[in-house]
Image: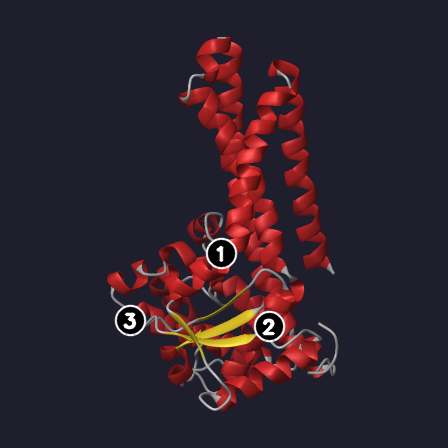
Amino acid sequence: MWLSFRLYLLIALMFAVLYGIIIGIAYAIGVRSFLAYGGIAAVMMIIQYIFGPKMVEMSMKVRYVTKAEAPELHRMVEELARAAGIRKPRVGISALQIPNAFAFGRWSSDGRVCVTEPLMHLLSKDELRAVIGHEISHLKHRDMAVITILSIVPMILWYIAFHFMWFGGGSRRGGQGVLIGLAAFVLYFVTNLLVLYGSRIREYHADLGSVKLGNAPHDMATALYKLAYGSAKLQKEALHQCEGYKAFFVNDPSRAKKEISDLRQLDEDLSGTIDRKELASVLTGRVKVSKADRMMEVFSTHPNMVKRIKHLAKLEPVFQGGRVAGKSV
């Protein structure tokens, strides 16, 4: 409930900012010019809505597979979708050589869940199920639509700033126009940070959703550990392939090398996994998040990995309390 409250509060805050800028511009130059910016943003959002899934498929090199081709993968997706109370999404395998998974679609009934080929060789069945549960939860929560809605605000502010600062809108109205452009640019930067904050909240929410679907927190924690380890070994060229789409992934591959050094401290027996005991030890504060890491997190689509693992450790009572697959997310 607290995660959902923060996300809804964020939506309200974003549109309060937008409402304020609308009032300011309406007062200064009239409503008609602002509607032009809103119209441009609306057209771009419609184009993204219509063609977005196809663009993701092409960029991520997705090939949809049948039950005969990937029976175990289909079984996991079907069981978890049924437990989450949503229609079974299409199942795909991405040819990207980055171990990861992602979900996308216009709405929950149009959902697609995809895993990359390296991921299927990296994780155990329980760990893979936890990751798929995470992606199913994204579809259940419809949080891709929420992030899209939030992204409208900085998009409109960018058009306003661009017009008044670089396209002559400010010169025609003197200092007042320049001030409007500067204010819109500052708000564009701030609201972009708020969108990133919303993206991090949805990752915590999807982790919680996976646990509620019956996946053990330590399996999800181990999956994140292995994903970071697998991504840390990749060449920069491989990481560049997904730079524009990393918000779709379970973790941020570009931060894996930094994250793996922190996560190794949790793997006390050097087994390559994070078991229940090791996960519980995170709550003791043995591994801390530095101020630099906290600052870097502000500009990231995903939570700091140590904070995320700590969140999973707190979910152990949820898992032990009987919130298993088949109950609502």
Counting residues from the start of the chain, the first of labels 2 and 3 encountered is: 2
Q: Picture coordinates of residue 7 (x, y %)?
A: 66, 52
Q: Nearer the viewer, residue 230 or 44?
A: 44
Q: Picture coordinates of residue 39 (x, y %)?
A: 57, 34
Dot 1 amino acid type: Gly
Q: Is residue 311 above or below residue 125?
A: above
Crowd band around label 2 with a 10 angstrom C-alpha radius: few (<14), some (14–19), many (20+): many
Q: Which residue is mark 2?
A: 136
Inspect this view and state whether residue 325 appears.
yes
**Mark 2 falls on what kind of element?**
helix
Q: Nearer the viewer, residue 231 or 119?
A: 119
Dot 2 amino acid type: Ile
Q: Picture coordinates of residue 196 (x, y %)?
A: 52, 49
Q: How many marks?
A: 3
The quadrant holding residue 41 is top right
Counting residues from the start of the chain, the first of labels 2 and 1 encountered is: 1
**Mark 1 falls on what kind of element?**
helix
Q: Picture coordinates of residue 290 (x, y %)?
A: 45, 54
Inspect this view and state whether residue 272 appears.
no
Q: Which residue is mark 1?
A: 52
Residue 239: assigned label: none
Whole-number angstrom distance, CA of label 1 to CA of label 3: 30 Å
Whole-number angstrom distance, CA of label 2 to CA of label 1: 19 Å
**Mark 3 falls on what kind of element?**
loop
Q: Nearer the viewer, residue 215 or 82?
A: 82
Q: Nearer the viewer, mark 2 or mark 3?
A: 2
Residue for point 55% across, 56% down: 200
Counting residues from the start of the chain, the first of labels 1 and 3 encountered is: 1
Question: Which of the image's four quarters has the C terminus?
Answer: bottom right
Please indicate whether residue 45 sits to the left or right of residue 293 in the image. right
Dot 3 amino acid type: Lys
Q: Which residue is mark 3?
A: 233
